[in-house]
């Protein structure tokens, strides 16, 4: 797997013209979902599941584990079960481009026990456990 940081101008063109394939991870602790408060668009200021783009050459599950490490600083070795998929369209994106930003996410769920080791990256400013996922985050079953 290659580090897939795409040059900004190229990435802007991609999000203007294609659907971004992503992964989202709904980690649970004591029956509640771990959500992180985003500092970037889309969904800036909203508590949201961990997630992001799947890089070329990695599986959706590998991307989910990478995003857990990147966003909360935990090397997650637990079981990740596929939940379904989530599709969305956003008016805002991280570049402030006036475009319809479209995503398709493969969603996973798992359990987290070590909550004392959570260290957020720059894309989040807070975290917490919630009884429900955000209303907008409507996961559809694969079946």
Image (cartoon, rainbow, N blue to C red):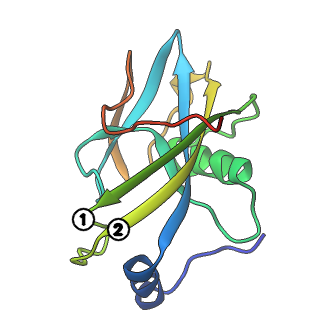
* Location of residue 129 with respect to 88 vertically, above or below: above
Q: Position of residue 88 (x, y in %)?
A: 38, 53
For numbered disc 2, what is the local secondary structure?
strand
Residue 101 badge = 2
* Location of residue 49 with respect to 51 vertically, above or below: above
Circles 1 and 2: CB atoms closer than 8 Å? yes
- Residue at image point 21% right, 77% down: 98
- Residue at image point 75% right, 62% down: 58
- Residue at image point 47% right, 89% down: 10
Is residue 92 toward the left or the right of residue 116 in the image?
Answer: left
In the figure, residue 123 lies in which quadrant? bottom left
Is residue 130 toward the left or the right of residue 119 in the image?
Answer: left
Is residue 15 toward the left or the right of residue 52 in the image?
Answer: left
Q: Residue furthest top?
A: 30
Residue at the disc numbered 1: 92
Residue 102 badge = none
Task: From the viewer's side, name the closer residue of 121 and 54.
Answer: 54
Q: Position of residue 28 (x, y in %)?
A: 54, 21
Q: CA distance from mark 1 to mark 2?
A: 7 Å
* Location of residue 122 with respect to 137 vertically, above or below: below
- Asked if residue 129 can be seen in this view, the reply is yes
Label 2 Cα neighbours within 10 Å, binned few <14 / some 14-19 / many ≥20: many
- Residue at image point 74% right, 28% down: 78
Q: Position of residue 68 (x, y in %)?
A: 59, 43
In the picture, which quadrant includes the C terminus? top right
């Amino acid at each position: 797997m290659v580090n897939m940081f795409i040059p900004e101008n190229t990435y802007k063109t991609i999000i203007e013209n294609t659907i971004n394939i992503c992964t989202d991870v709904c980690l649970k602790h004591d029956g509640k979902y771990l959500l992180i408060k985003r500092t970037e668009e889309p969904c800036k200021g909203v508590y949201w599941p961990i997630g992001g783009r799947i890089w070329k050459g990695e599986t959706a599950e590998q991307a989910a584990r990478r995003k857990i490490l990147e966003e909360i600083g935990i090397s997650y070795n637990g079981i990740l079960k596929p939940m379904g998929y989530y599709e969305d369209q956003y008016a805002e994106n991280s570049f402030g481009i006036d475009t319809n930003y479209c995503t398709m996410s493969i969603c996973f769920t798992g359990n987290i026990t070590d909550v004392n080791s959570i260290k957020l990256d720059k894309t989040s400013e807070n975290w917490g456990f919630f009884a429900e996922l955000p209303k907008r985050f409507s996961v559809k079953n694969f079946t």
